[in-house]
Image (spheres, rainbow, N blue to C red):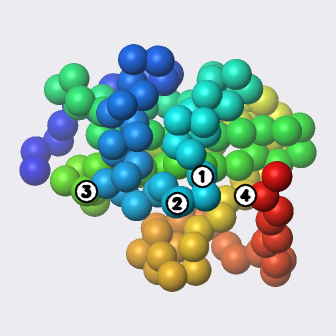
């Protein structure tokens, strides 16, 4: 594939259907999280950290970041399968890191399913390391 022109811009409400479709194609959705609800929560809280990537008018990537004053978080980093391995994920992370640094964020955390070895390798290639922690969660 030649070098496509990726436009990274903030999420807009009209993007919802394409974003959810992309998340489903990327395997980012799980039965216990409603993607529409996740989008609505993000639009209300820190919408300036929710981006989409567009090539030829089509959304081919997304990234949500968050910052609560202590740690930054990465969520819903997804790149359409047909656009993987050409640097889009790296562009996303550079965008997120710059935005989080601008907010004074000292460290980024993210969670990856342990079975998703290719994504773990991707983040390691960007300098992320395994933290010696146990991730716990509770659905409310």
Q: Nearer the viewer, residue 121 or 25?
A: 25
Circle 2 is placed at which residue position?
Answer: 30
What crowding class fits label 3: few (fewer than 14 Cα within 10 Å), some (14-19), or many (20 or more)?
Answer: few
Q: Earlier in the sequence, mark 4 or mark 1?
A: 1
Label 4 element class: strand
Q: Nearer the viewer, residue 1 or 30?
A: 30
Name the residue: 50% across, 22% down: 10
Circle 1 is placed at which residue position?
Answer: 33
What crowding class fits label 1: few (fewer than 14 Cα within 10 Å), some (14-19), or many (20 or more)?
Answer: few
- CB under 8 Å between discs 3 and 1: no
Q: Nearer the viewer, mark 3 or mark 4?
A: 3
Q: CA distance from mark 2 to mark 4?
A: 20 Å
- CB under 8 Å between discs 1 and 2: yes
Residue 28 image point, x, y percent: 47, 57
Residue 51 image point, x, y percent: 50, 30
- CB under 8 Å between discs 4 and 1: no
Label 1 element class: loop
Circle 4 is placed at which residue position?
Answer: 109
Q: Nearer the viewer, mark 4 or mark 1?
A: 1
Tell me, yes or no, if residue 46 can be seen here. Answer: yes
**From the viewer's perspective, is residue 120 above or below residue 54?**
below
Q: Is residue 70 left or right of residue 81?
A: right
Residue 55 image point, x, y percent: 23, 31
Label 3 element class: helix
Q: Earlier in the sequence, mark 2 or mark 4?
A: 2
**From the viewer's perspective, is residue 47 above or below residue 52?**
above
Circle 3 is placed at which residue position?
Answer: 81
Q: Earlier in the sequence, mark 3 or mark 4?
A: 3
Q: CA distance from mark 3 to mark 4?
A: 24 Å
Name the residue: 68% across, 31% down: 41
């Amino acid at each position: 594939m030649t070098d496509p022109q990726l436009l990274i811009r903030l999420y807009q409400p009209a993007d919802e259907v394409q974003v959810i479709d992309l998340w489903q194609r990327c395997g980012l959705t799980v039965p216990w999280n409603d993607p529409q609800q996740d989008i609505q929560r993000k639009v209300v809280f820190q919408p300036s950290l929710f981006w989409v990537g567009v090539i030829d008018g089509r959304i081919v990537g997304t990234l949500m970041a968050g910052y609560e004053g202590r740690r930054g978080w990465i969520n819903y980093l997804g790149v359409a399968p047909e656009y993987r391995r050409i640097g889009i994920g790296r562009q996303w992370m550079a965008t997120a890191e710059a935005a989080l640094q601008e907010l004074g964020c000292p460290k980024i955390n993210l969670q990856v399913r342990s079975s998703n070895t290719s994504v773990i390798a991707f983040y390691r290639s960007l300098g992320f390391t395994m933290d010696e922690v146990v991730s716990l969660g509770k659905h409310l």
